[in-house]
Amino acid sequence: MKPLPTSVASYSFHGMLAEGTCDVFRYLDMLRFRYHVGHADIWTGFLPTLEEDFLRKVRATLDRNGLTLANLCVDGPHVWMDDPEERAAHKEQMLHILKAAELLGAKTVRIDFGGTEGHTMPEEAFDYIVATYKEYAAICGDKGMKIGPENHWGWDRVPEYLIKVAEAVDSPAYGHLYHLRNFHDEPERGEAYCISKAMHTHIHADSIPYAKDVIRRLACSGYEGVYSVEHHSAKLEPERVDWQLASLRCLIAELNAEGYDQPAAPSFFDSVYGGK
């Protein structure tokens, strides 16, 4: 089994961003000098502008720090909006972001379906979502990128819709950002789908007690993306990310020692925290 690459999502420092103590350049330096990872995972909240001069500075910092951009995580524009004018504005913004993703060398791009969790996806929305992702996938495929949603809010958390859209888009450039076990319903179906389509992952703090076998299944599925820590507390972020990334590395080390052929044994953390 090849070494499993790790990263830290820039959203992990959204509290510091809000208080003005972290920007994209400090984040990229932290990846190299504090966390010693080889991949970045940039949330668009850390990109205050898409002006080319600024993006080239970001790309230069990525290159200088020996980092590849595993994922550009897009919040703000998403695919579906009920209002047609808002929908068109989101699409126009997303097309600019795809150009930024190319300049930054992104391997994957996440943009969400939209919609309201618990509400049925209308046929009009489904048709538009599929057509739009086909357009985005054609752009990304030509640039060596993948694009897809993340199961973290709205219609993205409904396995039925994830599968239905993926089958209709039917593109090798379409994938999924798997946010571990975060589904509105049918969690086993959702997890099986996300593992099969994963292009990137977010390993959140409360997934540590069960993440070990999910990581094993991803690795055995042929997933070649990055295992990226995403922290959410907005407090003591550098220190809590230290713990979260170290925990992820420990799980991977245990899997390397045990092998990947059988379901994972209970982790060290089960004996410490009692499992979950």
Image (tube, grey):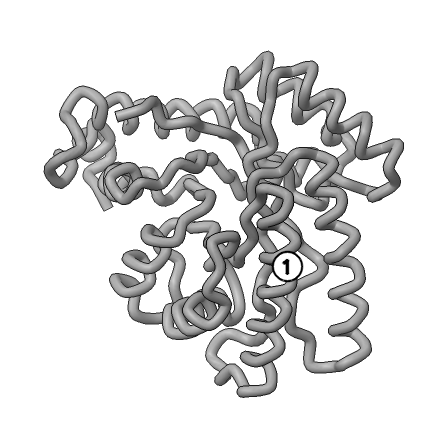
Residue under the point 22% across and 27% down: 255
**Mark 1: few, some, or many residues within 10 Å (few <14, many ≥20)?**
many
> Is residue 184 visible in this depiction of the protein?
no
Q: Is residue 33 above or below residue 242?
A: above
Residue 49 % position (x, y): 84, 43
- Tell which residue pokes out farthest to the bottom in this image: 123
The quarter of the picture where the N terminus appears is top left
Res. 136 image quadrant = bottom right
Residue 18 in view (yes/no):
yes
Image quarter of residue 92: bottom right
Q: Is residue 54 left or right of residue 9?
A: right
- Where is mark 1, residue-wise? 136
Q: Amino acid at mark 1?
A: Tyr
Residue at the location (58% across, 42% down)? Answer: 144
Q: Is residue 78 left or right of residue 90?
A: left
174 or 246, nearer to the observer = 174
On the picture, is 249 further left or further right than 87?
A: left
Percent x, y for residue 86?
78, 74
Left/right of residue 237 with respect to residue 156 in the rendered view:
right
Farthest residue in the front direction?
Answer: 142
Nearer to us in this view, 231 or 152:
152
Residue 155 is situated, as x and y percent measured from the top left of the image, at 50, 71
Look at 31% across and 24% down and name the residue there. 2
* Count of marks, rendered view: 1
Please tell me which residue is depicted at 61% across the width and 57% down the height of the picture: 138
Tell me if residue 128 comes above or below residue 32 in the rendering: below
Secondary element at image label 1: helix
Percent of width and height locating residue 223: 35, 41
Measured along the vertical axis of the image, is residue 40 above or below residue 14? above
**Depth order, front residue of 114/163:** 163
Using the image, determine if residue 14 lies above or below residue 259.
Answer: below
